[in-house]
Image (cartoon, helix red, strand yellow):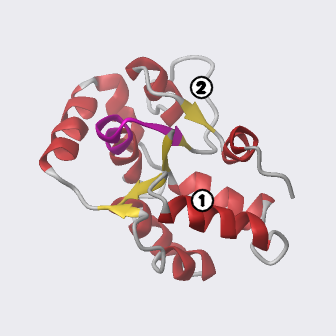
Amino acid sequence: MKYCIDTSGLSSGWRRHYPRGNFPSLWKDIEAFIGGGSLIAPDEVLEELKRGGDDLYDWARTQSGLFVPHDADIQNTVSSILANPEHAKLLYTQDALNPAVADPFVIATAKVHGCAVISNEVRLSSPSPKKNKIPNVCDDLGIAHISFLDLIIEQGWVY
């Protein structure tokens, strides 16, 4: 199985739940997963991490093979996703200076590359007039969605 990871998947793992200083073996496994081509992310995730300007960004930009550039298939898939008014709500942001735009690219990259999506977003239990979440759009499109912890469990990694 291949996975496409969102900014929230990386940042919650790195910053909140499994800091590299406390879980070095986990991050070695993640690096091996990247090196084996099993974990990817669109370039937009790196751009979102860059805004954080911390050690996660420094680590991420050294991970050869993690970030996938756009191609015509991904761009066309993003356009198709955003053509649905409910899916276009992925672009909702309360911070106009730092909009989060990676979400449709994460989903499109997963769709094009046959991946499950990793994010730490939680499904909306009822429709919102302004926003949508990655897990809800993945459900609509038949794309598997898991959390960072789910990845660890699925891979049978024990620390």
Question: Where is residue 26, by image quadrant?
Answer: bottom right
Q: Residue at x 77, y 51 (%)?
A: 157
Image side of residue 3 versus residue 23, left or right: left
Residue 117: percent from the left, percent from the top?
A: 50, 40
How many numbered discs? Answer: 2
Q: Which residue: 49% across, 45% down?
A: 3
- Relative to 51, 86 lies left or right: left
Q: Is residue 114 magenta?
A: yes
* Circle 1 residue: 10
Left or right: 65 in relation to 54: left
Residue type at mark 2: give it: Leu
Magenta region, residue range: 108-117
What secondary structure characterizes most of the magenta part?
helix
- The mark nearer the N terminus, 2 or 1, is 1
Determine contact: label 2, label 1, CB under 8 Å. Answer: no
Q: Which mark is residue 22?
A: none
Mark 1 is surrounded, within 10 Å at the Cα level, by few (under 14), some (14 to 19) or many (20 or more) other residues, namely many
Outermost residue toward the left in this view: 72
Placement of 93 over or under 24, stated as above or below = above
Pointer 2 local density, CA inside 10 Å: few below 14, some 14–19, many at least 20: few
Could you tell me which secondary element the residue under label 1 belongs to? helix
Whole-percent x, y for residue 62 in the image: 48, 80
What amino acid type should be assigned to the residue bearing mark 1? Leu
Q: Secondary structure at mark 2?
A: loop
Q: Which mark is residue 124?
A: 2
